[in-house]
Image: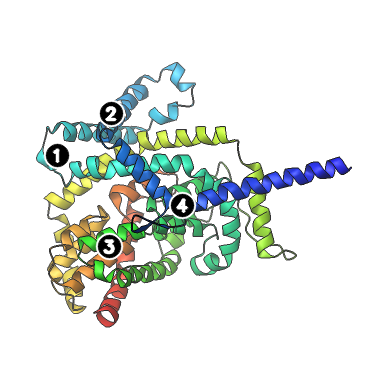
Amino acid sequence: MKTAIQSTNTKMTNHKLKFLIPTIIGAFLFLIPLPIDGQWLVLIAVLANSVQSFLEPMIVELLVAVLFFSGFGSLLATMTKPEWLMKSNLHPLVVVHPIWLSIRVVGAVFAVLVYFQIGPTVVLHETTGGEVLTGLLPTLAVWTFVMGMLLPLLVNYGLMEWLGTMARKVMRPFFQLPGRSAVDAMASWMGNNMVSILITIDQYENGYYTKKESAVIVTNFTITSIGFALIIASMLELEGMFLPFYGTVLVGVFVAAIICPRIPPLSKMQNEYYGPVGKQIKEEVPNNQSTLSFAFERAVQKAAQSDKPVQIVKKGLFNATDIWLGMLPIVMAIGTLALIIAEFTSFFQIISYPLIPILEWMQIPEAHLAAPALLVGFADMFLPAILASGIESELTRFVVGAVSLTQLIYLSEIGVMLIRSKIPVNFWQLLALFLIRTAITLPIVVFIAHFIIF
């Protein structure tokens, strides 16, 4: 009897350590900013930046090779469907639907044209295909690979269960979300919004978020990080007022996150869990337990049920490969096309005309320049700051920059990741949400700018 009790205690201690050790490491990597080289950075950002610096001499060539294989390797595999490939676990990576296959091929062609500088200028230009291949894709590729390997520290060993149970009383009444969604928001705020999206996709596909909850999170809580906000502030020459600038962004994001889940299209989405796995979440605290003890109990249970490290590494490699072969070509194709429309057509200027009298009524100087900058962010997150950098009025630059950071939905990166994922949001819903968020946050930012900041 004594031996059995000792064995049980030892096993329980091991399970607790299995929760505590990876959770502490994961929190330090993803959620806790540290003063590094004069900046407050999370360690995952330092690691990703170090990997990107190491790969910098060869990363563009590596990406061109990956995109070429993804496009034309997938074309060959999808057309021939060799028996050995169809029997392996790798076939979903290269045998794809004709629509995705076509986009992969377009992405591969764009990458080759840009790398060898052959073809039409609109594709090769440094603000279109050049920006995507040499600016966006290296960051996206490195971040997704590093996160794919280290994300299990956040989601597999109990941190989501612990923090989710603790934060439920705040997240559910305010935002109609499970408590664990606080992890998505924190990871995005402290590190990178791609972290938040990958966490949300993982949690939806594993039965912890419903269709509606996952859509709400990715369109309301993928908050641009402090680091990225500082870059935008620098581009707009607003570094000297960064704290009120980012504070204004957070106020706008908070209000939009309260309103958006309660109105269409998000309010019309079903609270159904991903079919193949069903509901797996349990955050309701029993009447006979404290929140803290139940949170710890759920976290330890999750850690005890987690896969062996070897299996987790294999899954991480598979997911990273899936992202590289499936998402990077789509970003190359759709991102380039979106930037071509933004840079070489009058599309955004034309559709922004109705916004000009509204901005003039709000007493925003240089409204004719601010209007397209407020809408072009749907194509790419950097474009509003690029267009607004030439505006003389500091107040107008402040408004454009702050609103662009509250819009959250950028087609060239986040939009592509969401459309490709199993989270049920489509292009038109993303466009509607972008416009709704703009309509909600613009008056808030203008009010703060007029009556508090300037």
- The x and y percentages for residue 183 are 50, 56
Bin the neighbour count of mark 2 within 10 Å (Cα to Cα): few under 14, some 14-19, many 20 and up: some
Q: Is residue 326 above or below residue 284?
A: above
The answer to which of marks 3 and 2 sits earlier in the sequence is 2
Describe the element under mark 1 as helix, strand or loop: helix
In the picture of the structure, the residue carrying the numbered disc 3 is 404
> How far, Cα to Cα, is label 1 from label 4?
36 Å
State the mark number for residue 30.
4
Q: Tell me the residue that label 1 is attached to.
A: 124
In primary-sequence order, the first of circles 2 and 4 is 4
Way the structure is coloured: rainbow
Between residue 73 and residue 42, name the one nearer to us.
Answer: 42
**Dot 1 or dot 2, earlier in sequence:** 2
- Closer to us: mark 3 or mark 2? 2
Q: Amino acid at mark 4?
A: Phe
Q: Residues within 10 Å of mark 1 (few under 14, many from 20)?
A: many
N-terminal of the pair, mark 1 or mark 3, is 1
Tell me which residue sits at (15%, 55%) in the image. 347
- Direction from residue 210 to residue 360 in the image, left or right: left
Quadrant in the picture for the C terminus: bottom left
Mark 1–mark 3 CB contact (< 8 Å): no
Going from N to C along the chain, the mark reached first, 1 or 4, is 4
Real-space CA distance between mark 1 and mark 2, rounded to the nearest whole angstrom: 18 Å
The residue drawn where x is 23% and y is 61% is: 234
Q: Nearer the viewer, residue 320 or 260?
A: 320
Q: Which residue is mark 2?
A: 65
Tell me the mark number nearer the camera, choosing from 4 and 3.
4
